[in-house]
Image (spheres, rainbow, N blue to C red):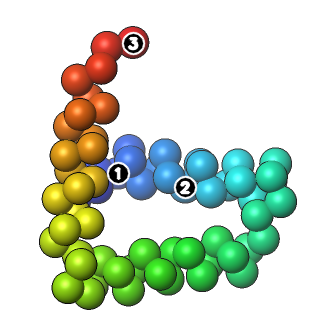
Amino acid sequence: MLSISAVLLLLLVVALLVRKFGLRIPHALASALLGFYAASSSWGPSITSFLSKLAAMLGHFSP
């Protein structure tokens, strides 16, 4: 499960895409809905596992 900091980071990325790069609100909402449907599908555990492994890998990098 994503922590609150990851959710806030993703929210900031979407806000940046909307404001600076012209991502339209309906496109962002459609992408969010796709994410919710993908997470609740049979792909959900695979997606969660991949994101957990990616977060762990990124967490090992030092600034």
Image quadrant where one finds the C terminus: top left
Q: Earlier in the sequence, mark 3 or mark 1?
A: 1
Q: Which is more N-terminal, label 3 or label 2?
A: 2
The mark that comes first in sequence, 1 or 2, is 1
Q: Residues within 10 Å of mark 2 (few under 14, many from 20)?
A: few
Please identify the quarter of the rendering in which residue 38 is found: bottom left
The 10 Å Cα crowd at callout 1, few under 14, some 14 to 19, many 20 or more, is: few
Of badges 3 and 1, the one in the foreground is 3
Q: How far from the left and from the top, in percent, is residue 30? A: 60, 82
Label for residue 11? 2
Q: What residue type is labelled 2?
A: Leu
Please name the residue shown 23% across and 34% down the image: 57
Disc 1 target residue: 4
Where's residue 5, x and y in %? 38, 44
Q: Which mark is residue 13?
A: none
Relative image position of residue 40 (x, y in whole percent): 27, 85
Q: Crowdedness of circle 3 by 10 Å Cα count: few (<14), some, many (20+)?
A: few
The residue shown at (19%, 46%) is: 53
Disc 2 to disc 3: CB gap under 8 Å: no
Which type of secondary structure does the marked residue at label 3 adopt? loop
Tag 2 secondary structure: helix
Q: Which of marks 2 and 3 is in front?
A: 3
Q: Distance between the residues labelled 2 and 3?
A: 22 Å
Residue 37 or residue 43, whichever sits in front: 43
Identity of the residue drawn at 69% across and 76% down: 27
- What numbered label is drawn on residue 63? 3
In space, the residues marked 1 and 2 are separated at their CA atoms by 10 Å
The quadrant the N terminus occupies is: bottom left
